[in-house]
Amino acid sequence: MATLFSHPQRRPPFLRQAIKIRRRRVRDLQDPLPQTAQEIEPPPPHFSPEERTLLYEEALYTVLHRLGQPEPSHVMEASELLRYLQEAFHMEPEEHQQILQRAQELEKPTFCLKATVKQAKGILGKDVSGFSDPYCLLGIEQGVGMLGSSPGSRRRQKAVVRHTIPEEETHRTQVVTQTLNPVWDETFILEFEDINNSRFHLDMWDLDTVESVRQKLGDLTDLHGLRRIFKEARKDKGQDDFLGNVVLRLQDLRCREDQWYPLEPCTETYPDRGQCHLQFQLIHKRRATVASRSQPSYTVHLHLLQQLVSHEVTRHQEGSTSWDGSLSRQAATILFLHATQKDLSDFHQSLAAPPEASEQGQHTVCVEASAGGKLRIPVCCRQWLAYSRLYQSLEFPSSCLLHPITSIEYQWIRGRLKAEQNVELANSFSSLLAYGLSLLRRFRSVFPLSVSDSPARLQSLLRVLVQMCKMKAFGELCPDSAPLPHLVTEALRTGTAEWFHLKQQHHQPMVQGILEAGKALLSLVQDIIGDLHQCQHTWNKIFYNTLKIDLFSTAFLELQWLVAKRVQDHTTAVVSRPVSPDTGESLFQLYISLKELCKLGPVPSERAGVLALDGFHRWFQPAIPSWLQKTYSVALARVQRAVQMDELVPLGELTKHSTSAVDLSTCFAQISHTARQLNWPDPEEAFMITVKFVEDTCRLALVYCSLIKARARDLSAGQKDQGQAANMLCVVVNDMEQLRLVIGKLPTQLAWEALEQRVGVVLEPGQLQNTLHAQLQGALAGLGHEIRTGVRTLAEQLEAGIAKHIQKLVGIKESVLPEDAILPLMKFLEVKLCYMNTNLVQENFNSLLTLLWTHTLTVLVEVAASQRSCPLASNRLKMALQNLEICFYAEGCGLPPEALHTATFQGFHILTSPASAENS
């Protein structure tokens, strides 16, 4: 059974782990649910209880046996680190105490100082030539940690290492001949028991070889060299010269030190003896934990890193913030201590660094404190291996992977990586690429637009993949890799198909039926349109700017094939039987949605081939009669309902028609909108559909006239006030006039001009004019007749009142002045004409005045003929005629002023000539 510390299995090449490439031919519309390709499974984000316990013991052991002075930004208190570990591993207090006690009882590790003698500069020249042949002796002096003691407090002496450290614990470097700036770069492991009672010693010597005086004189260059010959003659042959030493207390060292140290003299003769470059690291050997004894150090460290980073990410998520790649001071301290104590290589030590790390030195790990108590450790690029693997199991920003990539290329070019490290790096490339492609395949769900930072996260992932794939290291380690744009395009194509099938399953109706299947298919197409809009306006710019990939075109071409197959199957099943109104409405909505979908695609002139949705309207052709009938039926029902609810009251002072006219205008506008939505592509069929729309509209107009007149009769039947009936008749006439204006706009609303251009090649010249315009003129003529009939009815009602007042005029007593006698007639006309002017549109009011004037003259002539023997009556009638002329002129009679005056003059002549009146 695999454990936490088992070696990762070797993965097959990522081209076999990534998405399967699915090629489709134009004629192939059979697309079963695509099988998800085998993917790399990321390491589990959580450990079993046993694995977690062993890892926790390892972390506690690291804190308990901490060595060296803390770094400036590290946590100093062990208690604080232990509390952090308890929180990071979610340990209960009792369990924490048990594991802590067990770790304390384990055998202590062997403490070691890993010392690297790098080089020296400016040392003394002891040979006749002015140079030296330096080498170093080094070791640890133990049991010297007395209070108050320090390296400088001891008496200076030569041969400290030879005199104080046993020979078996003494180490020696190689001899570098004839130089004052020697380079050794040799590393030694020095064991010690108590860091507080131990010192590090390094003595530098000049190797003295036995040479003849003749050889030395040959190397003589100056007087100083001559003095050196005499001095060497007095000393023992083969005795080496002391060049200086370095003495350091181990308790003063940090876990990692890298400094130049001055070489101390034993006398004041030559106080300046140069410097020696030393590197130190306090490490453990033979750690007693189960993890350290059974598994490689790097594996244990990687899992510790994973556990702590998982805790950091979770803690940020609980605080509603995303992890920016920075580790807390506690986590950075523990990881640093563990990597140092385990003596991980430079390659593996860098894995302890957070993703923002940047290289500040070739082999130096520097720790710096950042704002907010976070710790960032700028190091070498090779942390990539750990974080690229953690990214596949933990949710943190992919931008954290960008920073190591440039350093990877730097390290690769310099050839610092070993063969086994190359294998690890190649596996990390393959694993991350396969995982990244799987995320891109599912980008709609992984990066939903409902989350505000999704576009930025997707762009960051693409940048990581682009930077990784264009590296020289990637090209050499993964030579069989296809170009990244090709892999991403295939992932997007496969992911689009998978998303389509998931959506199709989501909309699968619970009850199987034609109507339910149509609604489900309509919802699917609308989801596709919404997705394409998102691809076009949001996602496409990200993929194109990063990889020059047209995501929208890829998604559209893939989805239109899938949609075409479903729609064609559905319409074939529906039109094979009589289409019900509900099914027809479902088909119409589906047709409209497909038109919207096709508008998103490329225009025909820019296509590389035929699309599956080209000519899709033919699948719906059998449903056109049901659509037209449904449109007419809905409009008729709406007209009937509007008239039934109409009280025949003007909507306002400026709007003289009633509510039904408004509803009717809206109804006709909806018919025109339906015609524009349909916009049938075939010209000849489009012409026939337009003819049907115009015919239905004109029919509805005439039906409305009949219904509104019947409504007026019904409302006035119970009215005792005849004036109220006249008021309703005014509204009816205005409604008809409003309807005539709406009908007159049909050529514009139905785009007859554009239709005429389309059908010009299939219809005979003048056919559209003879058909559509003839229908329209017939409807307008019918409306005009209805309006004139209504105006005539109003005029007849007013004529009765006028005739009544004229009869009273001639019967008034002689004592009444003529001006007073005609006053009732004038008041009657003023009230009625003022109301009519207010409640009739101007054109109909003018027609009404014209009719009234004609009939009024007729009444006056008839009354004058009957009263020709009475001069008083004739005079009153002549005065009435003059006042009526003035009144009708003021109200804006439809007759021109000259015609009105002529009619008045003729009437006046008739009234003054009895013979003429009799003849008239």
Image: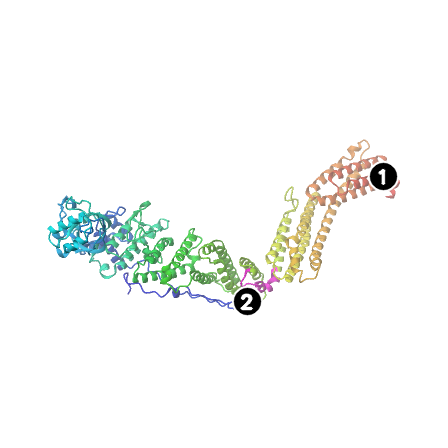
Name the residue furthest right.
Answer: 915
Q: Which quadrant is the N terminus positioned in?
A: bottom left
Q: Can residue 137 be seen in this view?
A: no
Q: Residue 220 at x, y = what percent?
A: 18, 51
Q: In this rendered view, identify the residue nearer to me: 480 or 261.
A: 261
Q: SS of the residue at dot 1? A: helix
Instruction: Give the residue at mark 2.
Output: 573
| Mark 1 or 2, closer to the camera | 2
Instruction: Give the residue at mark 1.
Output: 909
**Residue type at tag 2:** Ala
Q: How crowded is mark 1: few (under 14 residues within 10 Å), some or many (20 or more)?
A: some
Q: How crowded is mark 2: few (under 14 residues within 10 Å), some or many (20 or more)?
A: few
Q: Residue 175 at x, y = what percent?
A: 19, 56
As drawn, 340 above or below 851: below
**Left or right placement of residue 631 versus residue 510 in this view:** right
Q: In this rendered view, identify the residue nearer to me: 615 or 856.
A: 615
The range drawn in magenta is: 606-627
Q: In this rendered view, identify the residue nearer to me: 906 or 340.
A: 340
Q: Residue at image x 89%, y 41%? A: 915
Q: Residue 580 at x, y = what percent?
A: 58, 63
**Left or right placement of residue 595 versus residue 70 in this view:** right
Q: SS of the residue at dot 2? A: helix
Q: Which quadrant is the C terminus positioned in?
A: top right
**Alpha carbons under labels 1 and 2: distance apart:** 84 Å
Q: Residue 869 at x, y = what percent?
A: 87, 37
**Residue type at tag 1:** His
Q: Can residue 767 be seen in this view?
A: yes
Q: Which mark is residue 525?
A: none
Residue 918 lies within the magenta run: no
